[in-house]
Amino acid sequence: MKLSEVKSNNKLICYGKIIISDWRLYVLLLPLVIWYALWAYKPMGGLLIAFKDYKPNLGVMGSDFVGFSNFLTLIKGTYASQFWSAFRNTFLISLYGLIFGFPVPIFLALFFSEITNIRFRNIFQTFTYLPHFLSEVTITGLVLTLLYNGEVNTGVIAQLLINLKIIPEGTKMIQQAAYFRPMYIITGIWKEAGYNSIVYFAAIMSISPTLYEALKVDGGNKFQEIRYVTFPGMAPTLIIMIILRIGTILSVGYERIILLYNANTYATADVISSFVYRIGMESGKQSIGSAADMFNALIGFALVIGANYISRQVSETSLW
Amino acid sequence: MERLNRSERIFKVVSYVLIGAFGIMALYPVIYAFSASVSGKVAYESGKVVLLPINTNFTVYKLLYRDKGFWISYINTLFYTLFGTAWSMLISIAGAYALSKKRLLFRRQLNFLVVFTMWFNAGMIPTYLNYTSMGVANRWGIIVAFGIQAYNIILLRNYFEGVPKEIEEAAKVDGVNEFQLLTQIYVPMSKASIATVTLFYATSRWNGYFWSRLLLTNPMDLPVQVYMRILVENYQSMFDSMPIDLPYAADSYVYAILVCSIIPILLIYPHIQKYFAKGVNMGGVKE
């Protein structure tokens, strides 16, 4: 027996002894490990189908390898126009969501911190967090009925927009590609802004009041307080949140998109995840769909790592 | 009371107004859904219902009460939420407790494997193929194969890490074993975090739609979200092709189901809200 083998054997015996003497702790851990193995890590083996010509009757292992041909089909083959359109839409929806959606919870937190009547604040925090807990089916059900414009009746928000002359009379917003992104982004803000303000609110509340007082003694006004005390105080939180957002700029969830879009709005609405669903699940091209998903996920993953790296260089804050 | 200068006073007034406006906007669709569900057909279809109900009647609720499919799906959802949340909590609390212990072998690696799933997963199709090959297309499968979220594990783990070491040491001296330590000391001490995570798991179970619709083959197993969505899809296409005459506005029926699906959330969430503002921040984002 070689020395290294003796060592590794000793190591194993050593681990075994630790586990046996502390078995209860490992029993507690076991269900979690099994759950992650079966439902999070085992499917990753299925990513192989992105490099195969998957046939349901042959299974993941039995199907033939085709190298990168699925990826080529996507980027310059039969699916190229749909794929790039979905890629572009994913990026644009995320970007607009970031530009219009990101500042809202920050302002909400700033306003909440000004509310000194605790009862009022608690009640309105309950109100604004509520939509976060409603299901996508509920939210989209509301959107589809409130914006509905049909023969029998017109949804109340659609009617309001018509009355305010924001949209022309007779516009069927749900059926027109031009309205999809604003509809999607405003719905997102409505649903998540209140809830997302929690972290910023906590950051503001943890700023020492003496800093504000010091600035006031020097004759500073409210906007200087925000500029020189509040904003620097919440900067670490802000940086973390922006890294998180940039890292996920290529992942637009499929659920709300699939529930809101239709064939008339694919041009602006179809994102990678909904494309994967349509091609991979509905049209049965599992390999093509998987390749698209993987392509997107790898770029997304690189973005997370990149954003984290940059943030560590320019500030003290990072995710890991 | 501290003295406020002019700009501070203005900003305070603006804050109250804007928070008030946003709060009302957040709540409006829910109130409107209820009003629309109990308003008269003519009043609703002519667009007179804007906030409060007009010609109040409970016709659609009576219909809904007799709708067997609705009840089956509603009871199914209660089943998924109850058992699913219990399942998620058992695994998460036990696992997070183990991960919080410095002495755990391969602790760093195991933590990384949990966090990694927040940034990268197999994607929809491999995940779907895994579910079908493992036979989860039934009600117990939905309970077992879903509902563990890395974020919640981290939240609980961070809280457990914050429990002072002295408590554990003192308990161990008294001969308390690991199981008792967790159930009799850590769990009672972590009520706020546990309430928060329970709320998160329960709402995600209650709201679950996509995978149930994709996987469940038996209509008797469908949750209320799927039932509600199928209704929305059918009635809109139906009305676009040929409007039929009903004694109530078709929208009212959809709104009534929406309201019923929101009620449990409205009843439970505000009570737990006071915990989670704290709980969420403690979870933080650090690995």
Image: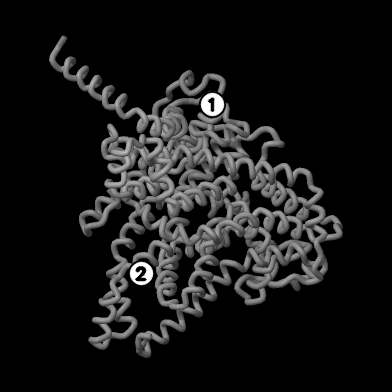
Residue A284, position as x, y percentages in the image: 57, 32
In which quadrant of the rendered image does the N terminus of chain B lie? bottom left
Identify the image quadrant of residue B68.
Answer: top right
Three-letter code, disc 1? Met
Identify the image quadrant of residue B254.
Answer: bottom right
Against A304, is A194 above or below?
A: below
Residue A78, position as x, y percentages in the image: 51, 37
Residue A256, position as x, y percentages in the image: 56, 51
Q: Residue furthest front?
A: B174
Q: Secondary structure at mark 2?
A: helix
Question: In terms of depth relative to the viewer, which is nearer, A83 or A12?
Answer: A12
Question: In terms of depth relative to the viewer, which is nearer, A10 or A114?
Answer: A10
Q: Which residue is denoted by mark 2 in the rendering?
A: A205
Separation of residues labelled 1 and 2 (CA atoms): 48 Å
Three-letter code, disc 2? Met
Horizontally, residue B72 falls left or right of residue B100, namely: right
Horizontally, residue B164 falls left or right of residue A187, namely: left
Q: Secondary structure at mark 1?
A: loop
Against A194, is A258 above or below?
A: above
Against A64, is A245 above or below?
A: below
Image point (39%, 30%), residue name: A27
Horizontally, residue A217 falls left or right of residue A92, namely: left
Nearer the observer, disc 1 or disc 2?
A: 2
Image point (20%, 19%), residue name: A10
Which mark is drawn over residue B123? none
Q: Which residue is denoted by mark 1 in the rendering?
A: B134
Image point (57%, 70%), residue name: B25
Q: Residues within 10 Å of mark 1 (few under 14, many from 20)?
A: few
Question: In terms of depth relative to the viewer, which is nearer, B195 or B50?
Answer: B195
Residue A75, position as x, y percentages in the image: 43, 40
Q: Residue furthest bottom?
A: B6
Question: In terms of depth relative to the viewer, which is nearer, A108 or B58?
Answer: B58
